[in-house]
Amino acid sequence: MELRQLRQVLVLAETLNFHRAAEKLHMAQPPLSTSIRKLEEELGVTLFDRLPSGLRLTPAGEVVLRNARRTLFYSEEVRRAAREGEAGEQGMLRLGFIGSATYSVMPELLRTYRRQYPGVDLAIEESTTVELLSRLEDHSLDVALVRYPVLEPTNAELTLLQRDHFMLAVSTDSPLAAQADIALSELGDVPFIMYSRTRVPSMHMLITCALHGAGIKPRIAQEAVQVQSILSLVDSGLGVALVPNNAVKYAGTGVRLLRLRDWPMQQAMGVALATLPDAMTATASNFVAVARSIAAAGLAGEAGGTTPGGYSPS
């Protein structure tokens, strides 16, 4: 049984005339008659009664006609899905993200992408930058939102979507909470809640270098991976922490965020989109285009350019 035979049954059922059906199908009548007869032999039933007045569907033909319509509909759906899949309008996008991306850039990005590509299924996974880049390079993720800068060697191309700056998180019970801003050089005696040296090495190194530049050797009371965990530890009074400014809305009533007067301007940080250009799916290409358009429009902060493994500051 072939799809062309089901289409022939459909047209023949509409016309109930071999000659008119053959014209609509752009074929000669004898091959049409032969094709229908072979289908009947294959199915073991008569689909059309051949009467002097014309054709008439048999009960078996009525059943076959209903299923033929359904089969042809789904076959066309398969073709449409294949076309849309090639264009990235259907299929799967596997997206990894760091927790802090949910504060600003990720909600706007996902809303826009889902609005433009509602037929794409999203598989979303939160992790650290190191783990996300590893997953990207072993092709178990298509794209990832990671923390910039990336200090580890990577084949990924990074597009800076949003620039952040650090603020000092302190407990509202801390004497420092009475200040509106503070200098790094004033933090010599306070314990720090620090990003994990092994799981978030870029943020750990960025903060450590800035503190060392200010003459501070930080006394690390605790390490954590996610900003939410760090803020919770600050709230508990275990120490202070340097966190991205976008964490302000998640700080809670027990935490106050202070501006830094002397953060080294050359130490940029932010959220970047990581991709492997040589292994880009159609859905990933569309996601990248949406992300870059949002960054260019300023919806996700100041955008930067791209180079393999880094970015070009504007």
Image: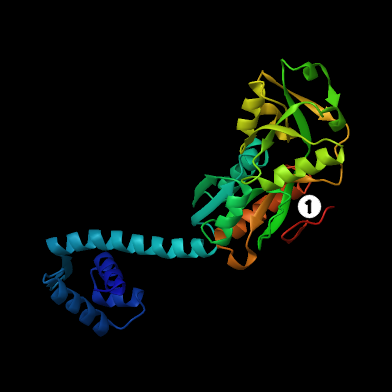
Residue 130 in the image, given as x and y percentages of width and height: 62, 51
Nearer to us in this view, 180 or 1 = 180
- Residue tagged by mark 1? 304
Disc 1: CA contacts within 10 A as few (<14), some (14-19) or many (>=20): many
Give the residue displayed 18% in from the left and 79% down from the top: 38
Nearer to us in this view, 289 or 194 = 194
Element at badge 1? loop
Residue 73 in the image, given as x and y percentages of width and height: 35, 60
Give the residue displayed 52% in from the left and 53% down from the top: 94
Residue 190 falls in image quadrant: top right
Nearer to us in this view, 76 or 124 = 124
Task: Name the quadrant of the N terminus.
Answer: bottom left
Residue 204 falls in image quadrant: top right
Residue 275 falls in image quadrant: bottom right
Give the residue displayed 24% in from the left and 66% down from the top: 13
Residue 168 in the image, given as x and y percentages of width and height: 77, 29
Residue 142 makes an appearance in the image: no
Snapshot colouring: rainbow
- Judge left or right: residue 139 versus residue 295: left
- Judge left or right: residue 234 versus residue 44: right
Residue 286 makes an appearance in the image: yes
Query: Looking at the image, is 177 positioned above or below residue 259?
Result: above
Query: Looking at the image, is 170 positioned above or below residue 219?
Result: above
How many discs appear?
Answer: 1
Q: Amino acid at mark 1?
A: Gly
- Judge left or right: residue 29 versus residue 259: left
Residue 259 in the image, given as x and y percentages of width and height: 82, 28
